[in-house]
Structures are given as structure tokens and as C-alpha cells.
Image (cartoon, grey):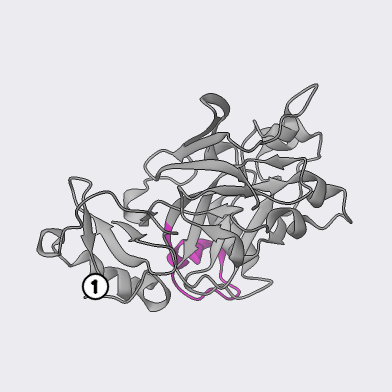
Amino acid sequence: MKLLRYGPRGAEKPGMLDKDGGIRDLSKVVDDIAGNVLTPEGLAKLKALDPASLPKVEGPVRYGPCVARTGKFICVGLNYSDHAKETGAEPPKEPILFMKATSAIVGPNDDVMIPRKSMKTDWEVELGVIIGREARYVDEKNAMDHVAGYCVINDVSEREFQAERGGQWTKGKSADTFGPIGPWLVTPDEVADPQNLAMWLEVDGHRYQNGSTKTMIFGVRHLVHYISQFMSLQPGDVISTGTPPGVGLGIKPNPIFLKAGQVMRLGIDGLGEQRQQVIATP
């Protein structure tokens, strides 16, 4: 299944895609794509529905973040061997974890705002993992039982705030609009192998990132297991699993960063695409 949320910001409704790519309204079945809806039991209830029996949503709509009421937005740093190499960093021996503020979350095609005093706003296409069952000290062999689905994430980052303002990554990752998520939550039955997904990102039509989840240092299964050793994972929590090479910071000899007026496009095979206009903070 491909689950989604559509409508004006703050008033999104739950939906799913039918076999023709049309949106079907789920608002009379569930209140949102969140919480218990993401559990195995909740997803089984939705899977049993005939999409053709649901109201069809007509006309163009805004896609909201594909999951609601996210409690934790957990990110993994330097998790691609080729990305670590481009930044000059040693590949980590254990996953590097940091948090991204949930207030950064926006829809997949919403504007991305460059923060005030920013000179180094950067892009990162990433595979998102959405938790569907509480995970606490889970074994690696059972970790995938806790995954509700996958999505595209743009882990927008301000590199000066991240690395030159006290070394705390969270402050460089958490500005409003720095977390576009979606367009869809794609359930695991439609993703044959999360460790073999092509992914890409373009700015103004120039492709900067062209990678694959196969170069992850720590795969999805290990990350769910590992993170659950330090904190419980709850339905609706999001894990952003790292980015392949091609970020602006890694361009040699002169890094390139985002400017107002530019357009980012990014996608992951089978998980959809995003498009964001870059604007200055009002």
C-alpha cells in the first residue's frame, strides 16, 4: 500500500493510492496516518479495503507529510561509505545518531526556507523508515517486524550551524521546513529490498546525488535494532537513515549551497518524488 495525507497544512486528511495512482479518501475509516493505524493490525485493516469502494479525491491536491504525530525524528550521520569518503570522515564503527526537531517536518513539495544568517544550507536525499510497532531492546533478527513503511526524506542541513556553532548537529538540522517527508508511506510488502534502492537529487535540473541504499554502512535492520537499545521507538517515529555522496558540502574544490529561487527535486525508486522551491525566511 501507499498511504498519504493530503490537504491544507494543519488540516490534512488520510488517504491511499489506488492501482491507477488516484487518491482515495480514508477519513471515514481512520482519523489519520498515525499511531495505532501504523501497527500491523492497523495496516492489515487498511489492506483489506477495496480502494475502489472509497471516495475518489478529485483535482490537484497538496501532499502533507505522509505520517502524522511523529514523536521522534531520529537521524543517522555518515551512514554511507561513499558519503563519508567525500566529507573526509572516517566511516563510523557504530551508528552516529542525532535528533531533528519534529517542527521541521513539512510536506514533500512544500517550500524550504533558508534560515536567517545562513550561508551553507545543503541538501540530502535519504531513505526514511517509519516505525509501526513499539521497539525496545529488539533483536536484530526481529527488527523489521517493527517497520510500518518507507518514504523519501530530504534531510535539509545548515552546515555552519551544524559544524561551526559548537558541534551540535541538531541545531544545523532542525530549522522550520528542513524535514520534507513523503509523498507516501510505502508498506514493506511493496519494497523487495530496502538495501537496494536507487536514489537521486537535483538542484535546478543538475543532478548532484545519484546513489543507492546498497552503500549504507548500517542497514535498516541493524539501525532499528541499534536505536532501540538507547530509546524506545513508537508508532509514527521516523528514522532518516543517511545520505549518499553528492551533497553541496562535498563538492570540491568549492562547496555549493542552496540559494533562494532554486528548485530541488529528489526521489527514491518505488517511493516517489519530492519537489521543493527554496525561499528566504520571511
Quarter of the image for the N terminus: give it.
bottom left
Tell me, yes or no, if residue 152 can be seen here: yes
Residue picked out by circle 1: 45
Relative to 280, does residue 38 appear above or below in the rendering?
below
Q: Position of residue 263 (x, y in %)?
A: 53, 35
Whether residue 155 is visible: no
User: 279 or 238: nearer the eye?
Assistant: 279
Examine the rendered structure and indicate whether residue 101 appears above or below residue 250: below
Residue at image position (81%, 40%) is 90
- Going by the image, does 45 lie left or right of 129? left
Image coordinates of residue 62 in percent, x first then y, are 36, 54
Location of residue 88 (image quadrant): top right
On the image, the x and y values in percent for residue 146 come to 46, 67
Residue 20 is left or right of residue 259, and the answer is left
Between 128 and 30, the one nearer to me in the picture? 30
Magenta stretch? 132-149
Compared with residue 97, is residue 111 higher up or lower down, i.e. above or below? above
Residue most extreme to the front: 282
Count of numbered circles in the view: 1
Hey, which quadrant is residue 73 in on the image?
bottom right
Any magenta on residue 179?
Answer: no
Height in image: 137 above or below 220?
below
- Taking the magenta stretch, the answer to whether it contains residue 147 is yes
